[in-house]
Image (cartoon, coloured by chain):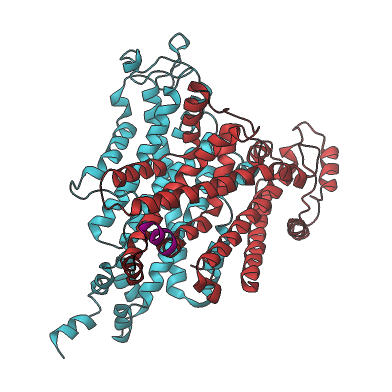
Chain colours: A cyan, B red
Amino acid sequence: MQPDDAIRLDPTVARAPSDAHRETRPPRTRLRFSSVLNLLPLVPLALFLVIALAGPYLTPADPEQQNLLRRLQPPVWAGGTWSHPLGTDGLGRDLLARLAIGARFSLFIGMIAAINAGLVGVLLGAFAGLAGGWTDRIITSFVTVSMAIPGIVIGIVITATLGQGLLNLVVILLLGGWIIYARIVRLQALALRQSEFVEAAYSLGAGKYHVLRRHMLPNLAPTILVLFAQGIAAVMVFEATLTYLGLGLSIEDVTLGSLVREGQQVLFSAWWAGLFPGLMIALAIVGFNFLADWIQARMRIDRISDV
Amino acid sequence: MARLALRAMAILAGTIFLASSGIFFLIHLSGDPTYGFLPVTTSPEVRDAVRERLGLDRPLVEQYLLFLQDSFTLDFGYSWSMRQPAVDAVMNGFPKTMQLALTGTVTAVLLGVAVGVVTSARRSGPAEWLLSATTLVGLAIPGFWLGTLLILLFAVQLGWFPSSGSSGWRSMVLPVVALTLHPASMIARLVRANMREVESTTYIRTARAKGLPLFVVQWRHMLPNAILPAVAYVGLHAAGLIGGAIVIESVFAYPGVGRMALQAALERDLPVIHAFVVLSAAMVVLINVLVDLTAMVIDPRLRASQVASHAT
């Protein structure tokens, strides 16, 4: 036996076979960035996080304090004052302060929902892909059927039956968000199950649990991480859409979606009240998608696409 | 063709079953449904009478089976808030919503394919940069916020298009633009990436070598081979496209089914919600069938094997 062969049969060399098709990976189609300046893609996310997490230090204003004498003040560069850098809303509340707490709440909901959706989706997908056979067929049918129900429809149904509330919102986001994890993790798990190194591990006498822990999970982990970063962005858009429509959360809760809705009500007299919350949402989407691309480039894994 | 129809029917039946079971479960999870539409002060006798009339006093299993039967026969009963059969209330708005969703989808495909093909010939330079920037913006902006911006610019500032309603093609322009930008960006990126891959094949080199103009090579030889992922994208995201139309309706006060369903959700009008879910799932399956047929027209291999585009 040549030393070369020994290495190839060694079940602990888990990542070697994936090198082969790395050369032929399809070109990127989604949110691409130049890898020249490696950390540049993380700037939008950093900006979003600074506003979301350091809000109280950015402005001393109270996000809930109303002042009808100072309502609809423009931003500082459009004739406003420094006491309200981004202006005020229809009730005279400081927009920057509201943006900060709204972004923080949206981020919080997004993280919670993405984690839950990820858990459900990854478990179902990995189970289907690893078990194969009838288990796979049943789960795949379930996924196919679930894909025919628009997420917004799920939101309408749950609001109609269970009413509004944080828990209900998270349930809506979970039901709308798990599918993408399940589909992609299943495909990866299927490919892994048929790969040579898994076969080799089995033929060398490794047990199911060992293969799962030593070969499957390490190979699935980067994919799951990327899906998670993309998932936070997707869930945050979904949440903003739902709260904009008045579904899921009650009116008093401040998220980026509800800020856009409030802004739209005073759209004709104060463009800033609707513009900045939307920009924050866009910043979050770009930020987390860039993060996903950054992880992909860093870990040199195949591009993940749902097409 | 028979297999395709059979598959669509199976998915449709499964979707109606799943959605109806989910709604039934949720309705009974949330307690006595009569509290949703009768005042709290209603006397117990009246409440019982209403429960009996709606069949809410029968055993749960019987109610469930009747509920499923109603779902498949499209008999959802009377709307609790609108004094008309629930299915009529939903069907009144559905054509408008589908008009919006289909116009948006077709526009997105045409625009995305055109942009993807035209920019695929240029390796780098301003065109490439512009496309990347535009599609990045398109992917990052949520539809409802884009709608708000469009109203601000084109309805309030410039006054070119109305900000709401549905009178003539002018009131369709802004909703369709708001609906189109995201899928068009995605399709443009997909098409361009796949055109690049097809470009290096030998049959394209042959087509170029025999002197065909670039235009013909691109549209006749490359595009049919490069467009399938974009078609598959439309199939996979059919639910998202319908959902997007429902959201955009609210932004532009467009009289489709989405606004009616939102109203019904807040009034807990469960028959209307039930009808709405079943019919919107049916629309998604219908779009998927259209997508599969389109894929077959484009790709002869699919006609031969009859593999559905969303088989994965």
In the rendered view of the protein, which quadrant contains the N terminus of chain B? bottom right
Magenta span contains residue A65: no
Which range of residues does the magenta coloring cover? B213-221
Residue at the bottom extreme, as displayed: A1
Would you say A106 lies left or right of B171 here?
A: left
Residue at the top extreme, as displayed: A69
Against B71, residue B242 (above or below) is: above
Residue A167 is situated, as x and y percent measured from the top left of the image, at 52, 43
How many marks do you count on the picture?
0
Against A232, residue A74 (above or below) is: above
Residue A253 is situated, as x and y percent measured from the top left of the image, at 49, 31
Would you say A211 lies left or right of A124 here?
A: left
- Please tell me which residue is depicted at 38% across the width and 33% down the height of the picture: A279
> Who is closer to the viewer here, B187 or A148?
B187
Residue at the left extreme, as displayed: A3
Residue B14 is situated, as x and y percent measured from the top left of the image, at 64, 63
Residue B271 is situated, as x and y percent measured from the top left of the image, at 74, 46
Tell me, yes or no, if residue B172 can be seen here.
yes
